[in-house]
Image (spheres, rainbow, N blue to C red):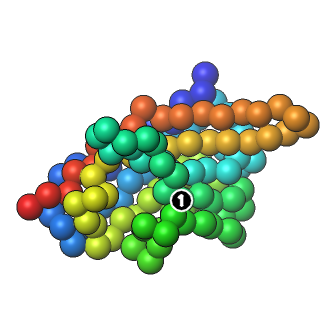
Amino acid sequence: QVQLVESGGGLVQPGGSLRLSCAASGFTFSSYVMRWYRQAPGKEREWVASIFTRGDSTNYADSVKGRFTISRDNAKNTVSLQMNSLKPEDTAVYYCNAGRVLSGVVNNYWGQGTQVTVSS
């Protein structure tokens, strides 16, 4: 059974930091690109960051570049998102995503999300 379980969300003041984690099970974690998305109230879900299978390539949305860092541990089947210099506009539910295309077959999994609120 595939599972992605996010943790680490919460309430933080502007300028503060949080570290989100996502624990994966039920699939071959090391062969999947891992991504973080977020969805703010009344807005569409948006991509935040990606990390490729070996962790040697990352990409970020312009809105978080320089403030957020994505990382993965293939031995522990986890992916993390370190969020620094948080802003009120970072408030959203953050989702972990695992994706792979292999021999034309698309596999795409989502976690249940974790709430991040940035407010004074």
Query: Helix or strand or loop: what does disc 1 sit on?
Result: strand
The answer to whether 70 is drawn above or below residue 74 in the figure is below
Q: Is residue 3 above or below residue 93?
A: above
Query: x%, y% of residue 36?
Result: 50, 51
Q: Nearer the viewer, residue 79 or 104?
A: 104
**Residue nearest the viewer, comparing 45 with 54:** 45
Residue extending furthest left? 120
Q: Is residue 29 above or below residue 87?
A: above
* Residue 90 seen by the camera: yes
Callout 1: 10 Å neighbours few (<14), some, many (20+)? many
Quadrant showing the N terminus: top right
Q: Is residue 73 visible?
A: no
x%, y% of residue 51? 62, 60
Residue occupying the point 45% across, 42% down: 45
Q: Residue at x 60, y 66 (%)?
A: 59
Residue tagged 1: 49
Q: Is residue 12 left or right of residue 104?
A: left
Q: Considering depth in this image, is 116 or 31 the residue closer to the camera? A: 116
| Residue drawn at 67 percent across, 51 percent down | 33
Residue at 70 percent of width and 46 percent of height: 32
The C terminus appears in which quarter of the rendering?
Answer: bottom left
Q: Nearer the viewer, residue 75 or 24?
A: 24
Considering every residue shown, the one lying at the far bottom of the view is: 66
In the displayed orientation, state which residue is furthest to the top. Answer: 1
> Which corner quadrant of the image does residue 95 belong to?
top left
The amino acid pointed to by label 1 is: Ala
Residue 76, percent across and down?
57, 50
Residue 46: image x %, image y %?
48, 49
